[in-house]
Image (spheres, rainbow, N blue to C red):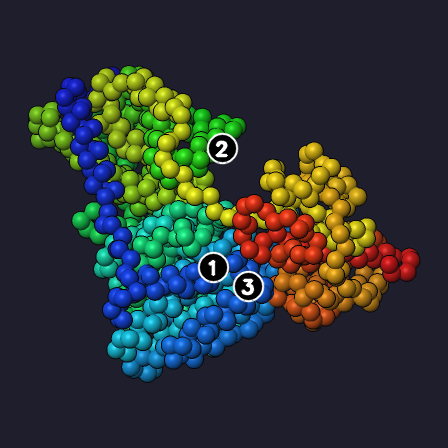
Amino acid sequence: METTDSALPECPGVAGCVAAVAAVCALAWSCLVTAALPAPASASAPAARFAAERAFVHVRELARTPRPVASAMNASARAYLVATLRSMGLDPQVQTATVQRQSMDNHHNVHVTLATVHNVIVRLPGAARGRAPLLVASHYDSAGDTFGAADAAGSAAMLETLRALRASPPLAGDTVFLFADGDNIGALGEQAFAEQHPLARQVGQTLRFRDLGNLGPAILQDVHGNAGVAIAAWSASPNSRGSSFMREVSSLMPMAPATSSLAALAAPLLQFAAVAGQLGTFDTPALLDRATLQHEGDTMLALVRTLAGSPASTKVEPDQVWFSLPLLGMLHYPAGSIWPVTRITCLLVFGVCLLAMQQSQVEAVDIVKGAFGYALAAGVPLALFYLDGLHGALAQMVALAGPGNGALRFMGAAAALTAAVFIALQRKLCARIGAMAASLGALAWLAAVLVVASWAAPGATYLLAWPVIGAALALAALHAPWVRALPSSVRVKLLLAELAPPVALLVPAARDAYAMPTPFRVHIPLWLLAIFLGLALPLLAVATRRLPARAIMLAGAAALALPGSASTPPPDPPRPNPLVYYKDMPTWSEWWLSSVPELDDWSRRMFPDQPKPRRLVDVFGWDSDDLWYARAARTSVEFPYALLLKNEARPRHIAFDLTSKNSAPNIEMRLQGGKPWRALVNGRELSNDDQIRGWSLSMYGMGGQTLHFAFDLIGDPLLGVHVEERIPGLPEQALPAARPKRAYIPMTGQTVTRDILWFRLGNEIQ
């Protein structure tokens, strides 16, 4: 049977192609243009209004230093929170709790985290009693190598929100504010609240603020439970942004937040986050956008005033899909609708394929070829960017160019190359099987991807379902006799209209994914471009002879080859001190260590006789990494103090006491040579599984208490227990008198003391 493309309109000519491209670009631009962030309100703003300048005072105080769990800096931040809340006439309570979490990899290696955390909790009474309180949660701790201004932003916004609420009429119901500890070790503070605090069982709705960046609006980044009412309340606020797609993207980030234990409460949860900008060393108060802080605070205050005292829905609904559209605002529907929408989409694609086979004489085998042809045309350019080193090079170029025009130019060049390769390959495919078969094949492939996404990434399904439905309806309409009778220019406009859903959905998704401070922003926009090209294939096929694929490819290659952007780079902030003071009990030695590739002038003084990094075999063995090392002076820092108690053979059982005379905030432990099927500390069961191969433990906030460990094991007669105490900062008495020329982040660098406890059968305990 001869294949024809009678349903597709004829090529509109050069002028028509230019007009089509201009129309698509105009639609894309309208989707990118969003309301500007609110200007930061000054400290003299009305008392009932959220003011970023007032909140920024709290950011500056909290983010003077890093605030890792159980450190003295963490305790200072907590004391500031308590004092500020009391100055408002509130009665904050500090919840001190010990919690644990366990993870196991595919090789049955178990890691246990045990921490004593300190949450600050305050309850703001409402006018009416008996209603489930609203919970507002953020955290105040940070990682140990950053100022953590974005970590402090949520707590600062909560303090300013509380001040504004105190200056306003009472809310309808009670509101509980949770300043959680331990977020950077797995959100253990929230776990402590959810598992051990009596208020957790009373919560009706939850708002969680956990920033992943220091720029841009606070977007709705995650949703749990039947939060439809809460989403509707939020979407009515100005400049509401976010999508369930961003939840899926966030889960791929190396810095992805741990799933909050608050999601397990019997209460709907909305999680907000600023996702743009840079963190790490750039996460300083000076680089935190105050407009971001204002938007986060406005969102928080508006939602608290709307939701406090409102009845929570009792209907069970596992999740939501949410996204915004120009002019229509925020749309959302229950996750239970995902599979019905997916089935409808697949049926529509199947139906339009049957219609084309009947009326356009398209053969089924050609549609299959079109599906594989689309996968090849879209996959080849993406695969090129994943060649060894090329993806990393592109990510590095984007990162070095910064947030300005240079990074956009590199991404635009990658997109141009992807589009050019796609157009060139599809041109050959359309010449062989026909444009209609190629278009239907692309739709069939995208429908198959939708089925997979409905199972693996349900929050992203709206990016495929609604555009594919629109494309299928457009192709079906082109087969209607009365549409075929229309002029070719009108049918081209129909194809243009079919691009409205993918542009309106895919362009904002690419923008938001690209704004995230992570290398993932490099390839996700290219994936979305590949989806758009598949949906635009009918229009591309019409204009295929007029599209200069070679010119697009050359332009993209030239943009990649041009020198970097001339945009002004961000100021170089203080960096973490790269030094480690390492005190090793087995070799009775002290060392200066650093794992960074290059040292600055000051830290280079610590390693005068070492021209390059190399292995410290005496301490770490032959299989260790290269590092800078040099002998250090002995200080008063203590070794871990252990008292060995039991070494029994049948059944294999060991016990020992461990005390940190340094009151180290963090103690790391690892077992070598045995398989502990049961582990306890002070009678608390840490693990109980006879499938365990390797075992390790991270402890935080144990202070100077004596810890009694007991292990039941299977395996080797020789067993080693490696113990490391980790303390923020360096012993000042061991540092050189000359001070560094550049500023380091305060209390960075690390002091580590190590010991190994050996248990051997057949001999005395050593």
The residue carrying mark 3 is 73
Mark 3 / mark 1, whichever is N-terminal: 1
User: For the residue marked with disc 1, what is the amino acid?
Assistant: Ala
Q: Is residue 213 above or below residue 727?
A: above
710 vs 331: above or below: below
Q: Between residues 300 and 479, which one lies in front from this camera angle?
A: 300
Element assignment for label 2: helix
| Callout 1 crowding tier (Cα within 10 Å): few <14, some 14–19, many ≥20 | many
Alpha-carbon neighbours of circle 2 within 10 Å: few (<14), some, or many (≥20)?
some
Q: State yes or no: discs 2 and 3 in contact (Cβ < 8 Å).
A: no
Q: Which residue is labeled 1 in the image?
A: 63
Q: Residue at point 14% right, 31% down?
A: 493
Please state which of the two labelled residues, at mark 2 or mark 1, is closer to the viewer. Answer: 1
Position of residue 346 measured from the top left corner of the image (x, y, whole percent): 30, 40
Say what secondary structure mark 3 lies in.
helix
Q: Are marks 3 and 1 in contact (CB under 8 Å)?
A: no
* x, y percent for residue 671: 73, 54
Residue sitting at x 22%, y 18%:
546
Of discs 2 and 3, which sits in the foreground?
3
Query: Is residue 5 rendered to the left or right of residue 95?
Result: left
When the figure is inspected, residue 272 is found, relative to residue 399, above or below; the finding is below
Label at residue 392 = 2
